[in-house]
Image (cartoon, rainbow, N blue to C red):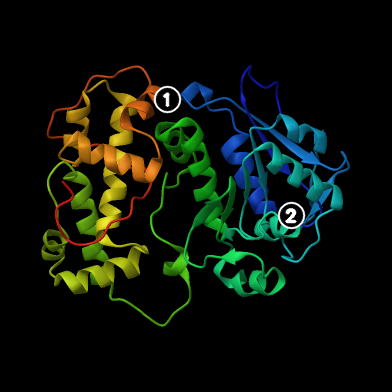
Amino acid sequence: MGKAAKNAYSVALVAFPGIRAFDVSVITEVWGTDRTDRGAPAFDLRRVAADTTPVPMRGGMALHPDRTLTWLSRADLIVIPGLDDHLTPAPTPVLEALRRAHTRGTPIAALCGGAFTLAQAGLLDGRRAITHWNLIDLLRAHHPQVTVVPDALFIEDDNIWTAAGTAAGIDLCLHLVRQAHGAEAAATIARSMVTAPFRTGSQAQFIEHPTPRADRDADALAAVREHALRHLHEPLTVADLADLAGMSPRSFARHFTAETGTSPLRWLLDQRIAAAQKLLERTDLPMPEVARRAGFGSEVTMRQHFASRLAVSPRAYRAAFSTAPVSTAPASDAPAPDGPVSEAAGSNPIA
């Protein structure tokens, strides 16, 4: 890696024999590529191991550490790749260093089977965690002190993050960027990677099950989602969307959840929060106008959803992540979404 920029966000990739090359590549792609010319933050990614001996990986590849475990004390974030063999024991110095880092308050994230490494360190005891759906029973069997959550893409408990399967590791990495640097930074990196800045739902939608759905139903749902994204600034109900799909509200909600892993109203709230985040970052529009364009109807409603989901007010979010104001779009234009989820239920208008 080249010389890190001053005040760059420091990320440690923890390496030891048995880590997955794919996860190493994901971590490197998100935090190890310089995109500052496109407005992305400056990162300082370091490959950290017990010593600087090359770490072998499957397929004849090797990772060359450039820092030892002592560097973890400087990291703003620590990320652990998944494992080829999910019961691979991590070196004792690695486990001890992770415990010390958590005690210091450093956020720690594990991709896929990396949850097993955190469990070996005892960091998941009494905490909620997730791993690939095909590994849930194995994690429960070998680490019964862990509260394994089966239906999430990623989850956080006490500053420790875990993620589900392969692609969910990308979701978690982008979420960690969004949490530290804002939605626009995450969207910039996601565009470069040609991936979604944020996926909704849970990994339940990817578990093998004999529930084939007709292509016409999937096409109808895709068309409904596209319509909703173009009309976020309007009051929308589940009944409205079901009518567009040519289904009853109950049938629509069932098919929508099976397709996306989340309820229609939760998905709508997800998109509204994302739209508001973009407007807060990119424009200097007054709060009531941001709320209107994002479809919340009122600043109070928007503030309530920001507080429940992001634990921050819209004004504080703008103060933390706003960029130079840009010329605003016509009032009828709804911004494109790329943000996180907020829970809700029912079929009443969101605003």
Direction from residue 284 to residue 164 in the image, left or right: right
Q: Nearer the viewer, mark 2 or mark 1?
A: 1
**Residue type, label 2:** Ile
- Of 168 and 37, which appears nearest the observer? 168
Residue 87 x, y percent position in the rendering = 75, 66
Q: Circle 2: is it few (<14), some (14-19), or many (20+) Cα within 10 Å?
A: many
Q: Residue at x 33, y 55 (%)?
A: 343
In whole angstroms, how far apart are the C-alphas of marks 2 and 1?
Answer: 35 Å
Determine whether 283 is above or below 180 in the image: above
Residue 336 visible to an observer of this rendering? no
Q: Are marks 2 and 1 in contact (CB under 8 Å)?
A: no
Residue 256 x, y percent position in the rendering = 28, 66
Q: What residue is pinned by disc 1?
A: 320
Direction from residue 36 to residue 55 in the image, left or right: right
Q: What residue is pinned by disc 2?
A: 19
Direction from residue 132 to residue 301 in the image, left or right: left
Say which element carries label 2: loop
